Image (spheres, grey):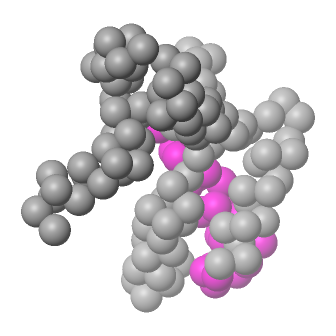
């Protein structure tokens, strides 16, 4: 790749990592799965694909092709990071509290122990707007 293509490569790589939040992990030398190894392997394979099959031309499709192939490879080169969605659980707990099914003391203790619950309840009651000075 020439310097112009190298700069484009870095720009697209930054976009892929920041916008899509690169929710994949890969194996490091010790066989442990982590996001740093995933990023390192992804970068290495994209660069190899550009040099070997794309004639040094950088494009968004190259990044997509390599990501797809790494996810489908056997053994797997990348795997998605599973993010647990607790929103329905939190909404139910707030609704139960508002309906009087959960004692105030228990709910306050739960809010102290769980930052997500506390933040969601502050947004629900409008206290979050007061905290930001709006």
Q: Which image quarter is the C terminus in?
A: bottom left
Q: Position of residue 119 (x, y in %)?
A: 34, 40
Residue 56 versus residue 73 in the image, above or below: below
- Is 71 left or right of 34, judged from the image as shown? right
Picture residue at 48% right of the left edge, 34% below the top: 98
- Tell me where residue 105 appears, x and y as whole percent: 32, 12
Q: Tell which of 77 and 24 is nearer to you.
A: 24
Compared to residue 43, the image places residue 112 above or below, namely above
Q: Residue 26 placed where, x, y %? A: 62, 34
Considering only vertical position in the picture, is 28 above or below 73? above
Start-end of magenta stretch? 36-59
Q: Residue furthest bottom?
A: 4
Is 80 placed left or right of 28 in the picture? right
Q: Position of residue 43 (x, y in %)?
A: 55, 55
Residue at image location 82% in from the left, 53% down from the top:
69
Residue that sits furthest to the front in the current view: 100
Q: Is residue 37 visible?
A: no
Q: Is residue 110 left or right of residue 64?
A: left
Q: Say if 130 sits above or below 94 in the image.
A: below
Q: Nearer the viewer, residue 5 or 85?
A: 85
Q: Main secondary structure of the magenta part?
A: helix
Q: Is residue 65 magenta?
A: no
| Residue 53: in magenta span | yes
Q: Nearer the viewer, residue 31 or 101?
A: 101
């Amino acid at each position: 790749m020439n310097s112009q293509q190298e700069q484009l490569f870095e720009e697209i790589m930054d976009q892929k990592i920041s916008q899509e939040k690169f929710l994949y992990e890969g194996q490091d030398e010790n066989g442990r799965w982590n996001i740093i190894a995933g990023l390192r392997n992804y970068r290495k394979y994209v660069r190899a694909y550009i040099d070997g099959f794309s004639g040094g031309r950088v494009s968004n499709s190259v990044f997509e092709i390599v990501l797809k192939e790494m996810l489908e490879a056997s053994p797997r080169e990348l795997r998605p990071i599973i993010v647990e969605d607790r929103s329905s659980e939190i909404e139910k707990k707030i609704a139960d509290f508002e309906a009087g099914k959960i004692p105030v003391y228990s709910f306050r203790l739960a809010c102290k122990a769980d930052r997500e619950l506390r933040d969601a309840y502050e947004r629900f009651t409008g206290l979050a707007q007061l905290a930001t000075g709006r």
